[in-house]
Image (cartoon, grey):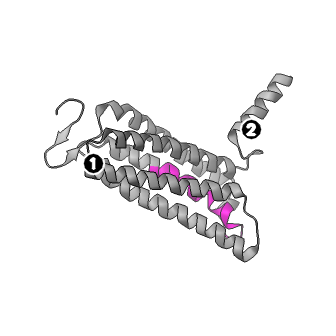
Amino acid sequence: MSGEWGYGRDYGAMVPESYHDFFLGAASVAGALVGLLFVAISVKPEHTQAGGHAHLRLRPAAALSAFVNALLISLFALLPVHNLGHSSSVLAGIGLLTALTVLGATVRELRTTGFRAPARTLIAVSGQAVVYGFQLAAAIRLILDPADLSAIGDEAIILIILFAMGIDRAWELIGASSPRLGRALADALNRQGAE
C-alpha cells in the first residue's frame, strides 16, 4: 500500500481510507432505511397492489431503488482492491432503467385514464433519473481512472442525494399530511410554539 490508496496487483485502486467511515456509515443507514421501507409498505399494502394508480404503486419502487443503490454502492466501496466504477456503472444503469420505467408508467397512465398525477411525481422521478445519469458518469470516470478522487467524492454526494430522494418518496408513501418534509416539520414547530 502506498499513501492513502491501496493498490492491488492487477486489480486497480480501492476507495481511499479517508472515505471508509463515510461508506461504512452510509451502508448502515441504507440498510436501516430499506428495512423501514418494508415496514411502511406492510402498513400501507394498498400502494403495492394492482388496481390503484400507477404512480402510487410505483412510489415504493422508486424509494427502494434509491435505498438499495446507496446500500450496494456503500458495500462495494468497502471491498478491498475493488474498482467502484464497475459496480457503480451497473447499479446506475439499473437505477436509470427503474426511474424511466416509473416515469413511463406514470405518463402512460396520464394518457389512458386522464388521471392527473401530481407534477411533483413527474419531477421527482425525472430528478432521480438525472441523479442516476450523474452516477453513471462518475462510474465511467472511475473505470477509466480508479484513482480519480473527485469521482469518488461525486459518488459520495450522489449517495446523500439518493438518501434524500428515497426518504422523500417514502414520506409520500406513508401518506403524510404534507408531501414536503420541510413543511411538515415547520408546521409541527409552529404548533409547538403556539402552545
Residue 170 lies, with reference to residue 23, above or below; the image says below
In this orientation, does residue 65 appear?
A: no
Give 189 or 108, whichever is nearer the viewer. Answer: 108
> Which residue in the structure is indicated by mark 1?
83
Left or right, residue 25 beside residue 37: left
The secondary structure that most of the magenta stretch takes on is: helix
Q: Quadrant of residue 182?
A: top right
If you read the primary sequence from the N terminus, does the residue marked by circle 1 or circle 2 appear first?
A: 1
User: How far apart are the two marked residues, 1 and 2, measured between alpha carbons?
Assistant: 41 Å
In reply to whether residue 65 is colored magenta, the answer given is yes
> Which residue in the structure is indicated by mark 2?
184
In reply to whether residue 45 is colored magenta, the answer given is no
- Binning the other alpha carbons within 10 Å of mark 2 as few (below 14), some (14 to 19) or many (20 upward) gives some
Where does residue 68 sit, x and y in percent of width and height? 47, 51
Question: Mark 1 belongs to which amino acid?
Answer: Asn
**Extent of the magenta region:** 50-69
Left or right, residue 92 beside residue 103: left
Give 112 or 78, whichever is nearer the viewer. Answer: 112
Give the residue drawn at x 45%, y 51%. Answer: 134
In this orientation, does residue 111 appear?
A: yes
Left or right, residue 180 beside residue 154: right
Give the residue drawn at x 73%, y 58%. Answer: 118
Give the residue drawn at x 76%, y 72%. Answer: 114
Where does residue 180 sit, x and y in percent of width and height? 70, 43
Q: Secondary structure at mark 2?
A: helix
